[in-house]
Image (spheres, rainbow, N blue to C red):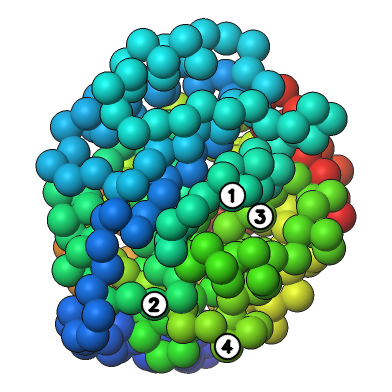
Amino acid sequence: METSIEWINYFLWIYGVFFAFVALFGFSVQRNKERGYASGEKMSSSDVTVIIPFRNEAENLPALLESIEDLSLYPAEFIFVDDHSEDASVSLIKERMKDLPIRIVQAENGKAGKKNAIRTGAKLVETKYTLTWDADVVVGANYFKALQRMSEADMYVLPAIFSSKSFLPHLFIFDVVVANAVNTGLSGWRRPIFASGANLMYRTDLFNELDSIDRHGHISSGDDTFLLRDFTKNKAKVRLSSDPELAVTTPAPETFGAYLSQRLRWISKTNALGDGLNTYIAVKQLLFMAAFVALLIWTLIQGFWFGLIYLIVCKTITDFLVFSAYFKQIKRPRLLLMLPFAELWFPLYSILLAVLVPFYQPKWKGRKIVNK
């Protein structure tokens, strides 16, 4: 039994030190960086055009449109791009947004998907910056006031936060918050490794210059992460902000099927991305998860109940200490109550994804997802 405790302690020390360095200390470095964003030539909302691609979003659009109506400051224009919707989305936008600076355009015939919808809108942008939102998000009233407090950069990776009201959706979003905490820490030390197109801003001229859609346009997802890669590979000034006033909120998956499909869609683009840092972090996380699962199974087989409880409790405490600062920053501290459940769920979830990835073909908006 002493040998088992030694292996458990060995795992906990390596795991704790790695994520304390990446996420906790990296988050502290990132916060110092963000304090410096106020220095230099400030952003102006009049220099921003918002592109919002949508497909069959009549159910989600009212919340977004209401939050747009409540904005205390507006950008130069909103461009809504209809990706061949079959519902009342277009008429809904026309009815609600008729007194605001908007345009509604149709995605090109024969070109479907979010990537192509964004590029249809991009051809119409005349401002210095382009900001993309998803059609199912909600924004705060002071979003653009907060934006104007920041100085100019080539790209801003802005926060997108899931909202949930019941137990399962809370569990479904926990891994995303942890991933965002790691991404924020990596941005402090080096650079972010992923972005969300639900809330991503970049210089329009650099987008037109660096966009590599000809190399990844056949892959259904990844409009955001591939664009981030284009900017970072070309040494652009990429910044990440964790300011909650710049966050958008989006509904969490409500069912297990929707949750699983979403995660498979997200991870399906990883191999095609070709980002060494992203791959390194993914491999590290996989190894830590495999070691954790192996220790769980080992203690169960041995009937070493003290070791099992010790492992779970210590890892839970470690994760709380490492990630709580980020949870507080995005104003989701109560979500930490899900941590004990997440500790037991994530190993099963990771194994399930690993088994399904080679075989499962996820769909989105009624379309098959192409991932290679």
Indicate left or right for 216 with 128 as reference. right
Q: In the image, which is nearer the foreground, mark 4 or mark 3?
A: 4
Q: Which mark is residue 122?
A: 1
Q: Which mark is residue 153?
A: 2
Q: Which mark is residue 235?
A: 4
Which residue corresponds to the image point at 58% horizontal and 71% vertical from the top-left? 206
Q: Which mark is residue 222?
A: 3
Which residue corresponds to the image point at 27% horizontal and 33% vertical from the top-left? 68
Query: Which percent across, then down, holds residue 170?
Result: 34, 40
Mark 1 closeness class: few <14, some 14–19, many ≥20 residues within 10 Å: many
Quarter of the rendering containing residue 347 = bottom right
Inspect the image, locate mark 3, and give the three-letter code of the amino acid beneath it: Gly
Query: Which percent across, then down, holds residue 42?
Result: 23, 74
Query: Which percent across, then down, holds residue 257?
Result: 60, 29
Q: In the image, which is nearer the foreground, mark 1 or mark 3?
A: 1
Q: CA distance from mark 2 to mark 4?
A: 12 Å
Q: CA distance from mark 4 to mark 1?
A: 22 Å
Quarter of the rendering containing residue 84 = top right
